Image (spheres, grey):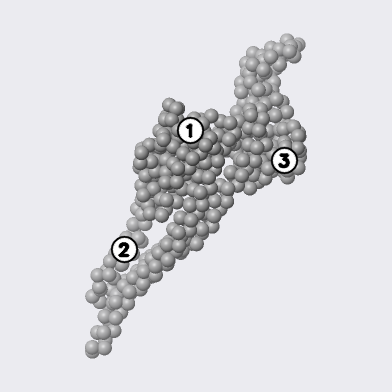
């Protein structure tokens, strides 16, 4: 609940400074006047940034949603359920979050409004699902659907992270080994070759030059990498650059299909949750487009939204040449013609997530031998550049 600092005139006619909480300034002024306190100046107090950005681990948050849903289904009022959960929670972020929401709800604030205080834990689409559940008196069902969605997203994220651990380790090991050889080993061999006045092969000369470039020009290389990272951040924020970047990523073999399916799963999941919670289809499509994580698919959805607003079904409103997987339009058509749009979106979500896992597994099946082959090739090339001058030296000794 918002907090205010008030410069006022007290009942005894003396000036005073008060600290109060209220839904809004109008309610606060009315409350003060009922106490014969006349406000002169009212200033809102910004809540601590650290508190508003509090966020629980996904598993812990999902568990709290399930517990709240069970208590609400049992007939416990929201403020009592939140109070019980806050009391049972161990000291920490969970107790702080629940206690803050419970205090606001006990004072008559709607649950979704109290939740919006924690902007990271309850972004607009999650708060909208809770608000729709409250408005339709289906809050337990909305909480259950939300918990299931967050759990599936968390599971898919964990699967992707586990799958990428081995390639990341191999890539880092390869990079570290190459840097060690070029920065520490090659210069030593170069000194030996120079002292022996050997005629070096082209491969060895190129490797020595590369080693010198890395040892003397590493600040330029680091600056280039940082510049590329900064360019990536700018590309993520600038609409045109982000659109070009996402379009290029979708064309990458296998990896692009994985990104396409993941974005489709996100769109269908969030749109379904909002639609089933009672949010209008146009609003659900707008939020779903914002949460796809891909500018190309998001633009197609916004175009389709205009068609839906004009009275066309969603499957016909998607622009020609859209980047969604081929199974999306038939599923949407079946769902809309039978009045089961939510079920169709649920099917798209499950199928797209499964396809994403399959394509990710396929990509990793190709990536692992490619990384090993690259590691073997790089190390073998460096070793060969060392041995060629030695072979030449040994051949000259034997000839004598």
Evaluate whether residue 94 shows in this view: no
Distance of label 3 from label 1 (alpha carbons): 31 Å
- Residue that extends furthest to the front in the rendered view of this protein: 338
What is the secondary structure assignment of the residue under circle 3? helix
Could you tell me which residue is drawn at 38 percent across and 41 percent down? Answer: 322
Which of the 4 image quadrants contains residue 65?
top right
Q: Is residue 110 visible?
A: yes
Residue bearing the label numbered 2? 210
130 versus 256 height, above or below = above
Q: Which residue is mark 3?
A: 70
Q: How many marks?
A: 3
- Residue at numbered disc 1: 286
Marks 1/2 in contact by CB < 8 Å: the verdict is: no
Q: Nearer the viewer, residue 360 or 400?
A: 360
Q: Earlier in the sequence, mark 1 or mark 2?
A: 2
Indicate the position of residue 150 as horizontal and vertical percent values.
Answer: 59, 44
249 left or right, relative to 272: left
Are there few (<14), some (14-19), or many (20+) residues within 10 Å of tag 1? Answer: some
Left or right, 199 with respect to 218, comes to left
Q: Name the spot of residue 371 as percent of width and height, x first.
A: 42, 64
Relative to 95, residue 309 above or below: above
Q: Please, is residue 300 above or below residue 184 in the view? A: above
Q: How far across and down, in percent of the image, does residue 286 sit?
A: 48, 33
Q: Position of residue 166 (x, y in %)?
A: 50, 62
């Amino acid at each position: 609940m918002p907090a205010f600092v008030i410069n006022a005139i007290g009942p005894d006619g003396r000036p005073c400074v008060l600290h109060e909480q209220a839904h809004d300034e109008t309610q606060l002024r009315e409350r003060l006047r009922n106490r014969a306190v006349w406000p002169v100046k009212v200033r809102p107090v910004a809540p601590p940034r650290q508190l508003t950005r509090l966020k629980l681990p996904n598993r812990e948050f999902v568990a709290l949603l399930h517990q709240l849903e069970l208590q609400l289904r049992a007939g416990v009022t929201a403020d009592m359920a939140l109070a019980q959960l806050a009391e049972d929670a161990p000291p920490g972020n969970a107790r702080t979050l629940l206690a803050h929401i419970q205090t606001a709800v006990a004072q008559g604030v709607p649950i979704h409004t109290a939740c919006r205080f924690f902007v990271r834990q309850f972004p607009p689409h999650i708060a909208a699902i809770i608000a729709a559940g409250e408005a339709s008196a289906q809050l337990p069902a909305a909480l259950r659907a939300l918990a299931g969605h967050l759990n599936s997203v968390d599971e898919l994220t964990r699967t992707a992270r586990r799958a990428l651990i081995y390639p990341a380790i191999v890539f880092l090991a390869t990079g570290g080994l190459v840097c060690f050889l070029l920065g520490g080993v090659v210069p030593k061999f170069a000194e030996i070759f120079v002292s022996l006045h050997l005629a070096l092969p082209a491969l060895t000369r190129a490797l020595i030059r590369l080693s010198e470039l890395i040892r003397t020009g590493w600040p330029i290389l680091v600056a280039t990498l940082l510049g590329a990272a900064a360019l990536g951040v700018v590309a993520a924020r600038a609409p045109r650059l982000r659109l070009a970047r996402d379009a290029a990523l979708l064309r990458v073999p296998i990896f692009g299909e994985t990104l396409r399916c993941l974005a489709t799963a996100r769109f269908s999941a969030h749109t379904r949750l909002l639609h089933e919670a009672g949010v209008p289809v146009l609003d659900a499509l707008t939020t779903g487009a914002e949460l796809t994580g891909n500018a190309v698919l998001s633009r197609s959805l916004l175009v389709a939204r205009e068609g839906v607003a004009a009275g066309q079904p969603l499957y016909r409103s998607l622009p020609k040449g859209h980047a969604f997987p081929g199974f999306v339009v038939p599923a949407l058509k079946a769902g809309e013609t039978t009045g089961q749009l939510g079920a169709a979106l649920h099917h798209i979500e499950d199928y797209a997530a499964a396809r994403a896992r399959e394509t990710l597994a396929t990509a990793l099946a190709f990536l692992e031998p490619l990384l090993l082959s690259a590691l073997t090739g790089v190390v073998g090339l460096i070793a060969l550049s060392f041995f060629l001058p030695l072979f030449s030296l040994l051949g000259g000794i034997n000839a004598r």
